[in-house]
Image: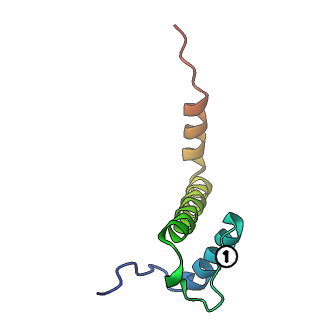
Amino acid sequence: MARRNLLVVRAANQALNQMRYEVAEELGISTPADDYWGTMTTRDTGAIGGHITRKLVAFAQQQLVGLNPQSAAVQANTEETVITE
């Protein structure tokens, strides 16, 4: 079966691998010494992947806000709006 999770930016491969080890360390999950992740439980690898996804989404959101200051102002105004009756 072919791998479908191809990287859009191939240069990101090394950074994502490094992030995998960092997140595993943060979660207290021991990493494989031989760099083969196939012997790990699905629960552990899923937790690592989930945390990586959260970090990548947060990073992308920060980049979007930084690229478009007007959208950040709109978002701030929306969050501060209080409706009183």
Mark 1 residue type: Ser
Identify which residue, 82 or 20, lies in the foreground. 20
Quadrant assignment for the N terminus: bottom left
Q: How is the image coloured?
A: rainbow
**What percent of the width, then of the height, locates residue 81?**
57, 25
**What percent of the width, then of the height, locates residue 42?**
48, 70
Q: Which residue is at a point 56% across and 55% down the rendered structure image? A: 61
Q: Quadrant of residue 26?
A: bottom right
**What percent of the width, then of the height, locates residue 76?**
61, 37
Residue reaching furthest to the bottom:
34
Q: Quadrant of residue 67?
A: bottom right
Residue reaching furthest to the top:
85
Identify which residue, 61 or 39, lies in the foreground. 39
Total of numbered circles in the picture? Answer: 1
Identify which residue, 54 or 67, lies in the foreground. 54
**What percent of the width, then of the height, locates residue 46?**
50, 66
* Above or below: residue 75 compared with residue 24: above
Identify which residue, 21 or 15, lies in the foreground. 21
Residue reaching furthest to the left:
1
Determine whether, in the image, residue 5 is placed left or right of residue 50.
left
Neighbour tally class for label 1: few under 14, some 14-19, many 20 plus, Cα within 10 Å: few
Which structural element holds mark 1?
A: loop
* Above or below: residue 45 compared with residue 65: below
Q: Which residue is at a point 52% across and 82% down the rendered structure image? A: 39
The residue to which callout 1 is attached is 30
Q: Which residue is at a point 51% across and 73% down the rendered structure image? A: 41
Q: Which residue is at a point 55% across and 68% down the rendered structure image? A: 44
